[in-house]
Image (cartoon, rainbow, N blue to C red):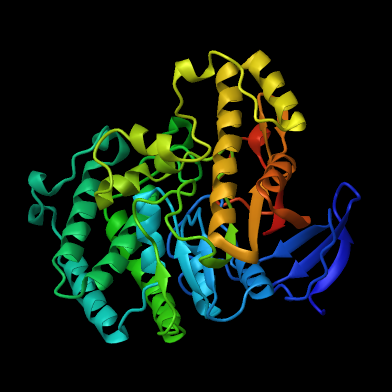
Amino acid sequence: MENVEKIKNTFGENIVQVDGEIPVDLPTDDGDRFLFLSHDQSLMTHGLHKYPAKFFPELPRWLIKRYSQENDIILDPFTGSGTTNVEALLARRNSVGIDVDPFSRFVAKVKVTPLSESSLKSAQKKLFESIINYHSSLISESDLPDFPYRDNWFNKEILFELSYLRKQVQQLDTQNEIKDFYRVCLSSIIRSVSNADDNCTRTVIRKKLNKSVKPSDALNKFAKTVMTKVPKIIAFSKNYPSDITVDFPENMDARSIKFEEGFFDLAVTSPPYVNAVDYPRTHQLEMYWLGFAQDSLTTLKKQNVGTESVSASDYKTLHEIGVPDADTVIQNIYGKDPRRAYIAFKYLEDMRKNLSEVYRVIRKDGRYVVVVGNNRIRGQLFENWKYLMPIAEKIGFKVENYFGSEIIKHFIKVPREERINTDWILVLKK
């Protein structure tokens, strides 16, 4: 294995470093730690849209090839931006991606949809012509979207440019799949041309940043994005196996998977971290522009596993999950912050429901591979992976293997005290 070597990290700990493609037969013993160096984070459609805490493609690719066969059916119950589904497709596996977030499902669907090169380039030509011919007089106030604090988030010139681009995409005389691709291209620049901090999980304006957004930035960034991403979707489309299916069903949830028993051969996922990333808030500006939200995001937030949107009545009393190590930590958090203690408990309770559902819908001897991170809550180290293993075993899973994956890059910054340095990969067998 030429790209595999043993190293020591800055703390003197033994780490196995894998540079690029992960060998399918890579030895993994319980407790091993790996540093996977990714080269494919923007390969084909993987880099179509920024998404926090995203899988690097080599990891699900390796797990899919290691634990399944061609034409098997793969499940990702927390599909996010669809990395697992793209990799399953390219490895000739059918797949299903479940996510409560409509924005997530939309981006993931575009990433796995093959497009005609001639139609793409024809639409691109029309869009570029419209950019050259742009003038603010071509947009009226009625073309501007209406959403909370709109004029704080965006300068007037940028509002008009984004509205113009959105209108031009809507008016393209082409298939909806082509329009959706260009909508994702537009969505991918929205944060960067807003007044919000580009590198924060929460959509916030930081005056100290002195972020500079100039007239024509939206037009120029959209054009550059299209020039970069059209070749990538074309490359994906040329590698697309037409006899393989991908589905992103609506009205499903990681805690309520509406498939029959034993339907899937393998499940691979990276669930949200407790108390770490507020996905609806991260993508709120994109959701407003794409029409997935108009006002409050609270209803959607409450549906997310790991949500911070809880009611005061929920945390009047201490809740316990029944795992001694977890309950000790939850009790310690409760002494400082009852609300955070309940959020931690609810996360584990939601993950129990997910583990139970996945156990039901995967076949006998099938595996559920969960990539999960730790974090700190009110100073307490919350080791998710250690708590999820006994929960999984109580449901009926056997913990076949567990090992660590060091994190070396964060797409979006999180506060230092909440930063996660190692993901843990749990291989659970039915």
The quarter of the rendered structure image containing the N terminus is bottom right
Give the residue drawn at x 22%, y 76%.
Answer: 123
Residue 145, percent across and down?
A: 18, 44
Q: Which of the pair 205/247 is nearer the observer?
A: 247
Q: Which of the pair 351/277 is nearer the observer?
A: 351
Q: Is residue 11 above or below residue 92?
A: above
Q: Is residue 411 left or right of residue 136?
A: right
Give the residue drawn at x 13%, y 53%.
Answer: 136
Q: Is residue 161 left or right of residue 53?
A: left
Residue 14, percent across and down?
A: 89, 56
Q: Which of the pair 275/74 is nearer the observer?
A: 74
Give the residue drawn at x 17%, y 57%.
Answer: 164
Q: Is residue 100 above or below residue 67?
A: above
Q: Is residue 357 above or below residue 221?
A: above
> In the rendered image, which quarter is residue 348 located in?
top right
Q: Is residue 42 visible?
A: no
Give the residue drawn at x 24%, y 68%.
Answer: 179
Residue 242, percent across and down?
A: 40, 85
Residue 146, percent across and down?
A: 18, 39
Q: Is residue 121 visible?
A: yes
The quarter of the rendered structure image containing the C terminus is bottom right
